[in-house]
Image (cartoon, rainbow, N blue to C red):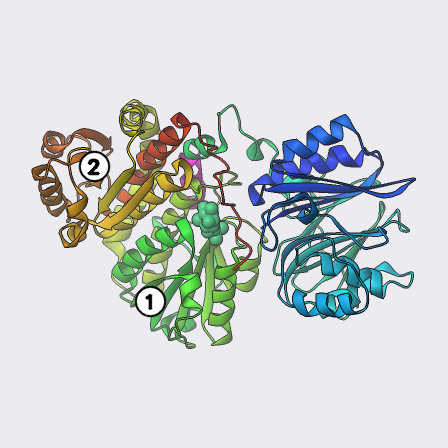
Amino acid sequence: MCGIVGYLGQRDASKVLIEGLARLEYRGYDSAGVAVLNGEGLKLRRSVGRLKNLADSLKQAPLHGNMGIGHTRWATHGVPAEKNAHPHPSEDGKVAVIHNGIVENYREIKAELVAAGVKFASDTDTECIAHLVAHYYKGDLLQAAHKAVCRLHGAWALVIAHADHPDLLVVARRGSPLLIGLGEGENFVASDVTPLLPYTRRVIYIDEGQLGTISRKEAHVYDAQLREVPVKVETTTLTLDAAEKGGFEHFMLKEIHEQPVAVEATVRGRVKDGRVDLSELNLDASRVKAMRRIQLIACGTSLYSAMVGKYLLERFTSLPTEAWSASEYRYANPIIDAQTLVVAISQSGETADTLEALRLAKSKGALAVSICNVMGSSIPRMCEGTLYTRAGPEIGVASTKAYTAQLTAFELLALGLGRMLGCDIAADEARLVAGLNALPAQIKKLLEGDIVAVKRCAKRYQGVANFMYIGRHYNFPTALEGALKLKEISYIHAEGYAGGEMKHGPLALVEGTFPTIAIAPRGHTREKMLSNIQEIKARKGVVVVVATEGDAEAHELADYIIEIPACEEELSPILAVVPLQLLAYYTANQLGRDVDKPRNLAKSVTVE
Ligand code: G6P
């Protein structure tokens, strides 16, 4: 977690840093700070709370200078407080450090430094890095940073400034993302590309274990032994527009409306002559044929897409498939060998638990691929191949378009692998390819048509304290995802359950005011779902039914009906989740919640 920006050039550094941090606030937002170098040395300003507090403080008392570093924090060690906000200075104030990650051995380093007489000013793990750099500094900042980094265990993206080096920032990366942006007579460093977009599209991704230096004119990259390595300059195709709200009240709403485009982009170019083409994964066909099992590893919303993926993969590849929460996988002794295909699913490509689970699988010889939304992020870099979801930057903390794009990618992956494995999928492929091509227009129609029904529903139930979501088979994960959306942004308690499990406990909760959202589109479990709905109605529960349009029986049973267009059963999770995203959005918005930045959460969870 945490967002990092650094700037060296002729512009007002504070302004560049604040604007850059605003684009990174999704990475954490409990405090923020900058250090700017001017004639009086490195000047720090830090504020608790949203970035606005820091921006206001800088407006009242500006810090002038054209070199600086900035940070937006999501606390891991030490409560959100001014003293714990970054940058962290050395005792003499000459060194300033910003950090994203965790120094696992900071206690040991701190004890050593304290014994040597260093006084710590914060409760963070990061502060020890500033003191270490100061301790090793003998005139060469890169050398000192390298020595300090060699002492660290854990994960870091680091930017280090020194008051005696007005034309130098030193960077280092392990386990947390970091990239350099190349301008004309100015250079940048950031956690992701969005802060750089107003200035440049030319970027250098810092790799695992690397360090780097930037001045106004140059950038150099070094390996872990401090040997210079050639820089690889890439040109990003992202536009600034894509990273901004585009007229919607919130990023989340904008991203919900971007789903037709996200799904279409994810399919584009991957179906040739009616067949799914996964050649971009560069998988060796004989290696794939040797696979005996598939393991899917992911967290949060990505895990729910993996649960749908499990059903699809088993259906079309006939290989036993498990969907694992990455944080469980790592400690549960999963059976992994060279005949295991591991698929990591991640919007950000940076989630620490998913990364570590992937590392474990690779260390045991598994063939690793990923479904990911962020090019050049850590997870795809570790994999043999990646099916990118092409949803564009997702800024709202609650994932929406990345989820439907992941589901789309799973349809392609399951069919493509099925074909590689010689399974008889031709008829299903023809059916689902046609269905996938129809989806963007169907989602669009759904977004235009059902908003009124969803808004009415959100208004009616916003005062309710508990919600139940139920679904079966492909739409059991939809129930989990619908419940997650509601609880994470509205703070209303919601539970997702398999429809058939209601009578084993949750039915006891049902009474007059208790609403259940039942996901019951056409398919082989619809009738069973209708029975579950009957059971709830018989106990005077309130039921909102998500059903296929024209389903008269569902209509009759429902207190509220939300209709989705008719589609292939395997594709129904992609359509059914859309009204649930909107229901969560409107409920949270009516309750005045901070929809894009729910309390206690962050988008990119780069700590375990
Ligand atoms: C956080 C986000 C979720 C996301 C999860 C996994 O909890 O708030 O929206 O689903 O991380 O993130 P990933 O980037 O790996 O998909």
Place of residue 123 in the rendered image (x, y in percent of width and height, measured from the top left): 66, 55
Mark 1 to mark 2: distance in Å?
A: 47 Å
**SS class of the residue under badge 1?**
loop
Residue sitting at x 87%, y 62%: 137
State the mark number for residue 130. none
Front residue of 433 and 525: 525
Q: Quadrant of residue 550?
A: top left
Q: Earlier in the sequence, mark 1 or mark 2?
A: 1
Place of residue 281 in the rendered image (x, y in percent of width and height, measured from the top left): 48, 59
List the residue tagged with mark 2.
Answer: 514
Question: In the picture provided, is 109 more to the left or to the right than 214?
Answer: left
Residue 388 visible (yes or no): no
Question: In the picture provided, is 506 more to the left or to the right than 535?
Answer: right
In the displayed structure, would residue 354 be above or below residue 482? below
Front residue of 152 and 454: 152
Asked if labels 2 and 1 touch by Cβ distance under 8 angstroms, the answer is no
Front residue of 299 and 608: 608
Ligand 1 neighbours mark 2 (CB distance < 8 Å)? no
Place of residue 98 in the rendered image (x, y in percent of width and height, measured from the top left): 71, 51
> Which one is in front in this view, the residue at disc 1 or the one at disc 2?
2
How crowded is the residue under tag 2: few (<14 C-alpha within 10 Å), some, or many (20+)?
Answer: some
Residue 533 visible (yes or no): yes
Extreme-left residue of the structure: 538
Q: Quadrant of residue 318?
A: bottom left
What type is the residue that disc 1 sits on? Leu
What type is the residue that disc 2 sits on? Phe
List the residue tagged with mark 1.
Answer: 421
Question: Magenta residues?
Answer: 258-267
Q: Quadrant of residue 530?
A: top left
